[in-house]
Structures are given as structure tokens and as C-alpha cells.
Amino acid sequence: MAWMHEIDGMGTERATCVLAPNPSAMTLDGTNTWVVAEPDAAEVVVIDPGPKDLKHLRRVARKIEESGRRVGLIVLTHGHPDHAAGAGKFAELTGTRQVRALDPRHRLGEEGLTEGQVITVGGLELHVMETPGHSHDSLTFWLPADGAVLTGDTVLGYGTTVVEGRLGDYLGSLERLRRFSEETGAQVILPGHGPSLDDPIGALDGYLTHRRQRLAQVEAAVEAGARTAREVVERVYADVDRSLWPAAEWSVQAQLDYLKDVGRLPS
């Protein structure tokens, strides 16, 4: 794992990470809460307040207050509890009227987020991209002024993400982000967990290569006799800590479904 001090406080001119104290095998060093604003703006956007941990939420609120600013908007990359559970309480602490998300269940107020929207707060521009795969409601935010791609859990600072949704959707999201990063000259990925990545295209190529390799391994395991996601995990993830096997089963099931969808395995 990266050292906490390498992650807490990292960022760009307009985006600063406040690391939540919830490290685990699934959350790496903890959840990255992002405070984003133009340098001289009075209002900030907070991306993923994090878990319902009052110490963390108060720390984020205090840092914003000490900078002489206020929270203008809270947005979520997706609704998993380590990113979203604290959003309502954080809104209460900071007097914020809106939490915007793709999934209506995680919103405060009526307004959501959808593909192609541009969020404007205090002169800041954040562009919304729907990038499903890790979850059905995963979003990525593009911060053009810093050349920064805020990926939530679609791309992590190290390791790979669990695919809870459809693998075809996830591969499509990675390919889209890869093309987007090349077309825009993106400079950095600011992930939902782990350190920032200064080579977006290299990171996305690595993710795509890893997924292709895993698909080949899953296909080989089935050909060797594995019939269930668990049996595939026992073969393909034999060298992985068993505490991660349940999460691996989710990803393997997504891979099995994908291989069937594209005709590489019998239905």
C-alpha cells in the first residue's frame, strides 16, 4: 500500500484529496474524498464525501472552512457506501442543499447527473461521463482546467477494481476513457482509492491488458473443467489472499457472463 501521507493532500491546482480513515483490502488506503474548486472561488465541489465517519466528514468540512470557502455542491461517482454513505450527514454539517448522483436513491434534492452534463460552481467546470461496469451507476468527472480525470472506482491508483456490473460495459468504459484521454491530452487520473496516476493512457492500457489476460485465464479454467465462479476462482486466483475471493467471484461471474454473451463459452 502507498503511505497515507502520499495520498492525503495530493492532487492538482484545483483538486485536493482528503483521505478517509477506512483502509481495507477492498478500499486500499481508504476512500479519496476530492475537494475541487477554482483557486480564488468562494465555493467548492466535494466529490465522494466517503463513509459515514463523523471524524472524516468534520475534517473535510473544517479544511474547507479554514480555506475561507463553503461547499456549493456534493457529487458522487457512485453509490457504494465507502463513497456515498456519509453524503447526507456531510450535507447537514455544511448546510449544502444538493447531493447529485446518477442513481436517484443517493440524491439529496431532485437534480441528478447524466452523461454530457457540465457542472459549474464558482467558475469551475466538471464534465460528467457515464462509465458503468464497476457498478451500474459509476460516473467519471473530467476537470479540463487541470487535465484531470476523476475515475471513482473505475480505475484505481493501484491494483484492479471489482466488476459488479456487466463486464462488456466495463470494458467499453475503459476503452472510452482510453480514447478520451488520448483525444484530450489528459494529464492525470485522480482515482477513488490509491495514489494519482500521471500516465492516464499507460494506466488504461494496463487495465485493458489485465482484463484480457483474466478473460483468457477464466476461459482456460472452464475448458479445464471449472463449472462455477467459485471453481474458477480456486484455479485462477489461487495465489490471491482468500479474504478477497468473494469479491473475485463477482468479477469472475461477470467474466463468465461476458464470455457467454460473446459466444466464447456455451450458454
Image (cartoon, grey):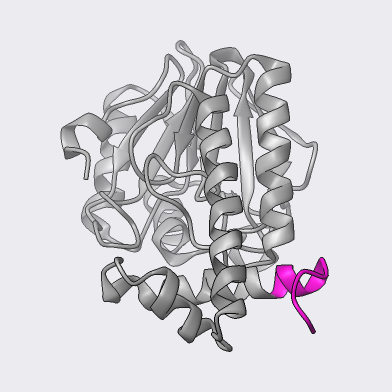
The residue lying toward the viewer, choosing from 117 and 139, is 139
Residue 214, position as x, y percentages in the image? 54, 59
Number of disc labels: 0
Is 247 above or below relative to 209?
below
The residue lying toward the viewer, choosing from 141 and 246, is 246
Residue 47, position as x, y percentages in the image? 49, 42
Is 90 above or below relative to 266?
above
Residue at screen point 77% across, 37% down? 117
* Horizontal relation, residue 222 to residue 7: left or right: right
Residue 106, position as x, y percentages in the image? 59, 64
Q: Can residue 119 be seen in this view?
A: no
Q: Can residue 192 be seen in this view?
A: yes
The residue lying toward the viewer, choosing from 40 and 2, is 2
In this view, the residue farthest toward the top is: 40
The C terminus is located in which quarter?
A: bottom right
Residue at screen point 65% across, 67% down? 165
The residue lying toward the viewer, choosing from 156 and 56, is 156
Residue at screen point 58% across, 70% down? 220
Does residue 1 show up magenta in the picture?
no
The N terminus is located in which quarter?
A: top left
Is 216 above or below relative to 250?
above
Q: Give the range drawn in magenta.
A: 257-267
Quarter occupied by residue 179: top right
Residue at screen point 70% across, 39% down? 175
Does residue 265 show up magenta in the picture?
yes
* Horizontal relation, residue 266 to residue 233: left or right: right
In this view, the residue farthest toward the front is: 224
